[in-house]
Amino acid sequence: DAGVIQSPRHEVTEMGQEVTLRCKPISGHNSLFWYRQTMMRGLELLIYFNNNVPIDDSGMPEDRFSAKMPNASFSTLKIQPSEPRDSAVYFCASSRQGAGELFFGEGSRLTVL
Amino acid sequence: TQLLEQSPQFLSIQEGENLTVYCNSSSVFSSLQWYRQEPGEGPVLLVTVVTGGEVKKLKRLTFQFGDARKDSSLHITAAQPGDTGLYLCAGARSQNFVFGPGTRLSVLP
């Protein structure tokens, strides 16, 4: 079975540009999580969905960040406008609700110049 | 302020040595997980501990959950270069997980 698939793996953009990160969770998993990882702050939860519904977005840094899950097999994390401090590795993870194990994608490394 | 603290932050040892890393919190968790992350990849689950005082073994790795379910330890016996990576603990809260900052382990041949 395919794991969690994220794209792009790497993105370099200039400050002020819009960035869209994509995630395809494992089929049959009904919880999806977006995390951000930096050396300074470690792995931080941004938002998570259960059955395509956002449950907790308290980790979303500010209004520049938005996330959607239009269906069970796709989610996006958008940053508009991007800033240099947004540079990080963004991970998507999925799990079967209640099962407890998080399956992570390989991450999207974002660099904002 | 980190909800979960991990120590040490960095650890560099020789192949064959034993080591213990710690995960501590002032909060009680319903369960606690340990993940290992290698460069360029996402974290991968090693173990989940649920019961206070529980001990789980995974080959050369031994995991313990504190009696009060606030802390945990990971002990590696006879470390190998393949054990190199970032070890993350994660506490379960509601339906999501809070991660510690990690212990970065380097095992030198």
Image (spheres, rainbow, N blue to C red):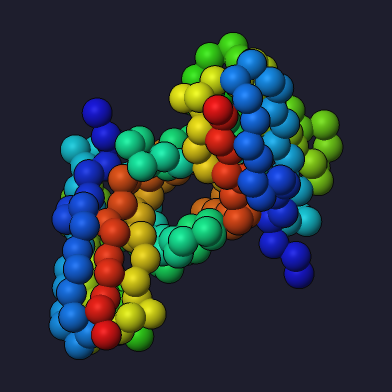
Rendered view: A91 above or below A103 = above
State whether residue B71 appears in this view: no
Q: Nearer the viewer, residue B72 or B8?
A: B8
In the rendered image, the quadrant that contains the N terminus of chain A is bottom right
Q: Judge whether B6 appears above or below B60 on screen.
A: above
Q: Is residue B63 left or right of residue A22?
A: left
The quadrant where residue B41 appears: bottom right
Q: Residue furthest top?
A: A63
Percent across and percent down for residue A87 are 51, 33
Asked whether B68 or B98 is in front, the reply is B98
Picture quarter containing residue B16? Answer: bottom left
- Camera-nearest residue between A41 and A46: A41
In the picture, the quarter occupied by the C terminus of chain A is top right
Q: Is residue A30 left or right of residue B97?
A: right
* Residue A81 relative to residue B84: left or right: right
Question: How far from the left and from the top, in percent, is residue B86?
Answer: 36, 60
Residue drawn at x 70%, y 36% is: A21
Q: Going 24% across and 28% down the picture, which residue do you hit?
A: B1
Q: Residue at x 38, y 80 (%)?
A: B82
Q: Name the residue: 83% across, 37% down.
A: A71
Whole-percent x, y for residue B89 in the image: 34, 54
Considering only vertical position in the picture, is A111 above or below A9?
above
Question: Percent from the top left, x then y, of residue B55?
Answer: 26, 71
Q: Is residue A3 visible?
A: yes
